[in-house]
Every structure is written in structure tokens, then in C-alpha cells.
Amino acid sequence: MHAMDQEHNREPALAAYTEAERHEAMRRFAVLRPHLNEGVSLPEAARDAGVPLRSVQRWLVRYRATGVAGLVRAPRSDTGHRKLPAELVEVIEGLALRKPRPSVAAMHRRMCELATQRQWTPPSYSSVYGIVRDLPPAMVTLAQEGPVAFRDRYELLYRHRAEGPNAIWQADHTLLDILVLDANGAAVRPWLTLILDDYSRAVAGYTLFLGAPSHRGIRAWRATWPNTS
């Protein structure tokens, strides 16, 4: 979906904020716009705007997860906990986004060591746990599971809808829990492919075959079907 379409869909949520918060969200969106709409790299967009790359990366994750409303300034991660130095909070968040993520106990030990070195009051275990817990789920998914998992869970996808029968067909593949013998006599599990009519959800066709499904196989199979137009 185009970035501006996504912005339009999120407008009602953004309207719930104050004028100052909306202004801040749109200012951040203006920084992201060259990357979203013009293909400018994120580091270049951040450099042109004079904004730290780490901040722009956070904005992009929040925008992809919840639209422009996600660019409203988020409450501090240590809200409700004992006051902690901003640098300490950032280090905790950075550790929590590492792959593999250290345990909260390990992070707490490291933060106590850092606090002692900087002559700060050591944070409590519950404070460290609260900061980790309050990280945006979309940001954690992107850091821990990668961009593919992030897109599957959080990015908005445009879905074409058929206006009549046989306008759009969809293929659905399933590896069956049965064994058959292939041409060499080896026992293998066959694939079942169903072709569904998007408009009526009726089954337009199906086949059983060996080997992983592919668009080439479907096209070759489609050429043998009767004309349904």
C-alpha cells in the first residue's frame, strides 16, 4: 500500500491526539517521506533531516506498525519506574533488541555494573524488566525475527477483490500426511493444490502432484483446463 494511502487510513486515530502531538507526528513523517515515497535510503533521509539514524529507524518501525499515529511521541520506557538516566534506558533497550536476547537477569547485572562505573544508583530488577516489557512488539519482531516476519505481522497489504466469478483465482497448497510411491519406488508425501474462485470461494480445480508447488507448474496445469471465461 502506498505510504499516503496508509496515512489516510490512520487519520481517525491521529485525530485523537492534541494539535502539538499531531504536529510532531507529521514532522517525523516528513523525515520518513523520502524513504517511503521516493526510495531514498534511510541513512540518507536521516542525514538530510539532521536526525540521528537510530531515531529514524524507531520512527519507521512505529509507522509501519500503526501508521502516522505511531509517530506521536511515545511515553518513556521507564514511566512508572524509578527515575533512570536516559543513557541507561537506551543501553537496556539496545540489549533487549539484540539477537539472541540476553536474559533480564543478565541485563540487570550488566546495568548494575554500568551504574557503579558511572556512579549512578543501580536500577532494580523490576525497572529493567519493565523497560524490556514496554518495548513496541513490532520493534522486537523486526530485531529478533527479521524483516520477513515483521512484514507478515505488521505491514498493511493491499488486497485485490474480485468483482465477479472467475475474475481472480487463488492457489492454496497443502503437503498431505500420506505416503505414495514415486516413479523410482520411493515413498513420498504428495502436495494437494486447490484453486479457489476469489468471488464465490468455490473450488475451481485441484490436483495432486509430487515435488514442491511453483507458479510454473500451476501455469502448465492451467493450460489444460477448459475455458471458464
Image (cartoon, rainbow, N blue to C red):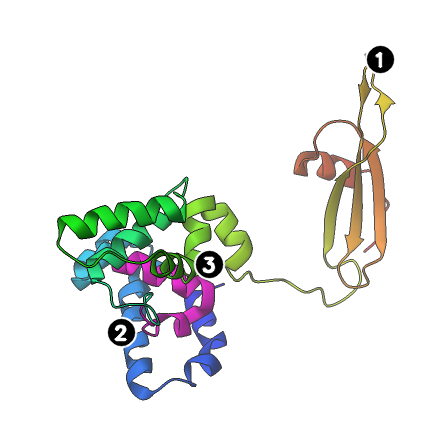
Earlier in the chain: of badge 3 and badge 2, it is: 2
Q: Mark 1: which amino acid?
A: Gly
Local SS, label 1: loop
Magenta-colored stretch includes residue 63: yes
Q: Is residue 216 above or below residue 26?
A: above
Q: Residue at x 30, y 50 (%)?
A: 94
The Cα atoms of the two marked residues, 1 and 3, are separated by: 49 Å
Q: Residue at x 68, y 65 (%)?
A: 161
The Cα atoms of the two marked residues, 3 and 2, are separated by: 24 Å
Q: Which mark is residue 185?
A: 1
Q: Mark 3: which amino acid?
A: Pro
Q: Which residue is mark 3?
A: 137
Q: Residue at x 85, y 52 (%)?
A: 203
Magenta-colored stretch includes residue 16: no
Q: Nearer the viewer, mark 3 or mark 2?
A: 3
So how many labels did they put on this image? 3
Q: Which residue is mark 2?
A: 27
* Magenta stretch: helix, strand or loop mostly: helix
The Cα atoms of the two marked residues, 1 and 2, are separated by: 65 Å
Q: Seen in the image, is 217 located left or right of residue 225? A: left
Spot occupied by residue 115 in the image (x, y as percentages of width and height): 19, 52
Q: Seen in the image, is 48 located left or right of residue 214? A: left
Earlier in the chain: of badge 1 and badge 2, it is: 2
